[in-house]
Image (spheres, coloured by chain):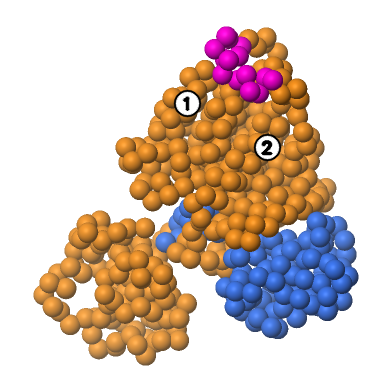
Chain colours: A blue, B orange
Amino acid sequence: MAQLIIPTPLRKYTENAATFNTDSITIEQAIEELTTEYPDVKQHLLDGSGKIRSFIKVFVGEEDIRSLAGEQTELKDSDVVSIVPAIAGGTYDLLLTTHD
Amino acid sequence: MQEIHLSKEELARYSRHIIIPEFNIEGQKKLKAAKVLVIGTGGLGSPMLLYLAAAGVGTIGIVDFDVVDDSNLQRQVLYSVKDVGRPKVEAAKERILGLNPHINVIAYNEHLSSKNALDIFKDYDVVADGTDNFPTRYLVNDACVLTGIPNVYASIFRFDGQVSVFNYNNGPNYRDLYPEPPPPGLVPSCAEGGVLGVLPGIIGSLQANEVIKVITGIGETLSGRLFAFDALNFSTKIFKIGKDKSNPLTGENATIKELIDYQQFCGIVPEQKQEGLKEITVQELKQKFDSKEDFQLIDVREKHEYDFVNLGGELIPLNTVLDNVNKFSRDKPVVVHCKGGVRSAKAIQALEEKGFTNLYNLKGGIVAYAKEVDESLPVY
């Protein structure tokens, strides 16, 4: 069973779950399983065409899935999948100071 | 290169560096010869500047346009109570020169922008990015690539920290890691943000360590790797970062040859006064309270903000407004407020599409009320 690590900014959409265990065969299926379990997280992870958003990196172990087989990367039992979003700073937000 | 000389006082001061075999006097001379530009003198910049100054980096440039605020002191350890209200670069310069008078500090009390970045960067050997927003992240990255300067990167959010070294020895840059920033609106707003005060201390110190490694050439930098730290469960991870062939700056068909409009790139449009938005000032709100006028006050912030300070309004967080339309009165004036006036304007816009005509935005939000009407209220 592979394990997905949910980053803290997204945990509010996963009922604070920090990890998600999956028997899915590929990254794509694992993320589909995650977003079925926690529908609110979907729009934060995937764009309109169902692709992983460009400000979110997915790593299997220490390898970027882009250097593997992308979303079709196959998962092994002991794999740890890290979802790592871009973060910008602590003073304000993930966005910018123009937001209130 | 000009011969670097260390005085007797400097040799004594840096003796704990000099006696490390891998570092020795050559490393110390490299530090003295180095010019490092630190972007942002906040949470990350504070420990970084203290350690870089203490370590003996010969020339340190600091860029920030902000002034020291009470709410900075929770994590920005460069500053003291007496600095509140002062320009950060001025207070920072004084503090680090007090720590080490053998260095040269150049303060840029200005906004880093596409207009001034290349001009400022060209005089430095290393840039250390400790900013707090995406447009400046991409600006710093692109300016480093265009000027050929390594970018020692660190970023924090709540309990998470990231560190890397970009554009170093032909390694990847920030756009190889994250091609695009999150679009506005998809990510938590500042009100839901925040940061554990000690986190920038940890991450900014690691960033200073990478700066020193880049300057001296000792050890193995984080070039091509992303360090990620989660302070909550103390997990540390290192991920590999490869080059992206489609990188618009350094990829096969690079299209970016000069600095661009980074606000626009990050989807941020200049704040415009919403067409037809009715506003009231904090003084007018006070009059309504004083004259016991019949009106409804709605607070669209989050509960933890409301618990921190409130004006007694009904709490309906912005993202629940459309589920609670029936709680907004249609037959008396409704004043809607948030922290600064942006979220409440969004709420009003959404409600006016549902036919409301009796909604008023509190200009400047609860912060303006606390500053201009009731100074006993805390601000955040």
Quarter of the image that includes the C terminus of chain B? bottom left
The type of residue carrying mark 1 is Leu
Residue located beneath label 2 in the image: B210
Q: What kind of secondary structure does the magenta stretch mostly adopt?
A: helix
B264 vs A6: above or below: above
Looking at the image, tell me whether mark 2 or mark 1 is earlier in sequence order.
1
Residue A17, image quadrant? bottom right
Q: Chain of mark 1?
A: B
The reply, left or right, for residue B215 in relation to residue A72 is left
B5 vs B319: above or below: above
Residue B314, image quadrant? bottom left
The type of residue carrying mark 2 is Glu
- Residue B346: where, in percent of width, then height? 42, 72
Residue span colored magenta? B6-19
Q: Please name the residue shown 65% across and 51% down the image.
A: B162
**Residue B345: in sight, yes or no?**
no
Q: Secondary structure at mark 1?
A: helix
The label shown at residue B99 is 1
Q: Nearer the viewer, mark 2 or mark 1?
A: 1
Q: Chain of mark 2?
A: B
| The magenta stretch spans residue B101 | no
Q: Please name the residue shown 16% across and 73% down the image.
A: B289
Q: Please name the residue shown 41% across and 42% down the image.
A: B66
- Residue B15: where, in percent of width, then height? 62, 19
- Residue B52: where, in percent of width, then height? 57, 30
